[in-house]
Image (cartoon, rainbow, N blue to C red):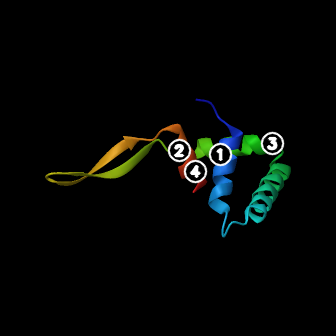
Amino acid sequence: MGFHFGNIYFSILGSLIKNGEKKKAKSILDSALFSASRKTGISCSSLLLIIFSKLNIFIEVRKIKSRHGIHMVPILVDYKRRVRLVAN
C-alpha cells in the first residue's frame, strides 16, 4: 500500500467537520496547509506524508472479552485504521 494524499486529506477534513459545515472545515485545513507549506517550502502533500510518517501508529491495544474475563491485547493496525487515527 502506498501513500494516498486524498485518503489522509479527506480523513482529516472529515474529523474537522462540525454540524455539516464542510466548506468552513475545508477552508481551515487548506489555509493551515498552505501557510505551513509557504513557511517550510515543502508541498502540501509532502507535509501530510511527513506528519503521517512521524506519528508511526502501528499497534493498538484493544479489550477482548472471553469467558474468563477481559484481556488487553495488542493488535497490528492496518493502513486504513492508521489514516483514521492520524486524522483524529
Regarding residue 44, the answer to whether it shows in the image is: yes
Residue pictured at 81% horizontal, 58% vertical: 31
Q: CA distance from mark 3 to mark 1?
A: 15 Å
**Residue type, label 2:** Arg
The answer to whether 28 appears left or right of 55 in the picture is right
Residue 43 — which label?
3
Task: Name the residue that disc number 1 marks.
Answer: 8
The answer to whether 45 appears left or right of 12 in the picture is right
Sequence order check, earlier mark of 4 and 3: 3
**Residue type, label 3:** Ser
Element marked by disc 4: helix
Circles 1, 2 touching at the beta carbon (< 8 Å): no
Closer to viewer: mark 4 or mark 3: 4
Residue 86, image x, y percentages: 57, 50
The answer to whether 85 appears left or right of 32 in the picture is left
Sequence order check, earlier mark of 4 and 1: 1
> Looking at the picture, does residue 29 appear above or below residue 75?
below
Image quarter of residue 46: top right
Circles 4, 1 touching at the beta carbon (< 8 Å): yes
Residue 82, image x, y percentages: 53, 44
Furthest residue to the front?
20
Image quarter of the N terminus: top right
